[in-house]
Image: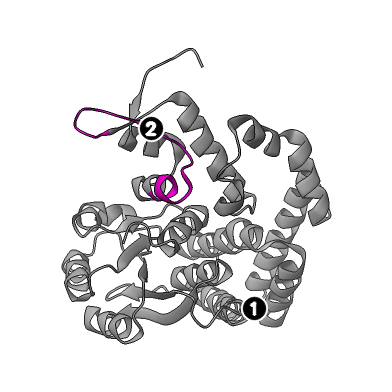
Amino acid sequence: MTNNYKYPIKVVSQMTGLSVHVIRAWEKRYNVVEPDRTDTNRRLYSEDDIEKLKLLNDALHLGHNIGGIANLSLQDLRSLLSKENRKAIEMQSGFSTAESSHNIEEIFSESLEAIKNYNAKKLESILLNASARLTQPVLIEQLVIPLVYKVGEMWHEGEIRVANEHLASSVIRGFLFNLLESYSVHENAPIVVSATPRGQEHELGALIVGVVAASSGWKVIYLGSNLPAEEIGAVVSHLNARVVALSIVYPNDDPLLPKELKKIKQILPSGVTIIAGGRAVDGYLDVLDEIGAVVVKNTKHLRVELEAIRDNKYN
């Protein structure tokens, strides 16, 4: 690197896609980078530091555990993520990237056709077969989430009836719940409570969060939709949960939700992390920042945040 310019942690967070919390946690736990410090103890990162953080983030997305790759050199990480290694990963899954993309598109189209024809059994069969062929991240990120979004868009545009949307939601809900229940986690695993706050009726996002958390070794308590702050707080306190995960999908301008989010924060015991995500989350960024919530952009980001929290380095 010829550029010796140093970057503050907030800029690094934007450049790498990692939250400030995760960067600090990785430094403390794994010593992944050693930033310089100013006279006032502010972190300053080099471009090599930034590249390493980006590569680590990419490797996690491919299924690696941070504990197994944190101590790799920059060159080793580049090699790990090289074209040859990507091809090796694809070969293990049974088909190439192009074939994978084609298969997912085909599954997606078949799913929509089943929904349009009110064929719940067919849709369920398609999803079950997909779960056997695809890795969990691919299944959730490239099939289930786009399918949920597409069905919602088609309903809003009048391309399908309410009955189609309800049928799809019912089948996908059952599929996700069965997937969630299929994970076996350690009895002493940390607990995440997943729900939607009061006024948020769409629960599939909270179920998706539960599946991702369970696959990451968390014990998931799924509470469903439209939960008052008092109920969420009671469950968290009773079970000594580490995380409350809130799905915020619609609407993005509920005037009552900011007050509800503040109430959740006030009720929760100290040390409990609030994670928020979903299509409408951008409408509430100010209040989420005020209550110190971690806002996740996607399921990849969620996995990274959960791993950092599990290491108990920023609670």
- Quarter of the image that includes the C terminus: bottom left
Residue at 69% from the left image edge and 61% from the top image edge = 135
Q: Nearer the viewer, residue 168 or 191?
A: 191
> Distance of mark 2 from mark 1, alpha carbons?
57 Å
Q: Position of residue 1 (x, y in %)?
A: 51, 17
Amino acid found under the numbered disc labelled 1: Tyr
Q: Quadrant of residue 274?
A: bottom left
On whether residue 220 falls in the magenta region, the answer is no
Is 224 left, or right, of 187 in this rendering? Answer: left
Q: Quadrant of residue 250?
A: bottom left
Q: Which residues are magenta?
A: 25-42
Q: Quadrant of residue 265?
A: bottom left
Q: Position of residue 159 (x, y in %)?
A: 54, 63
**Mark positioned earlier in the residue sequence (2 or 1):** 2
Reading the image, the residue beneath label 2 is: 35
Q: Position of residue 235 (x, y in %)?
A: 32, 85
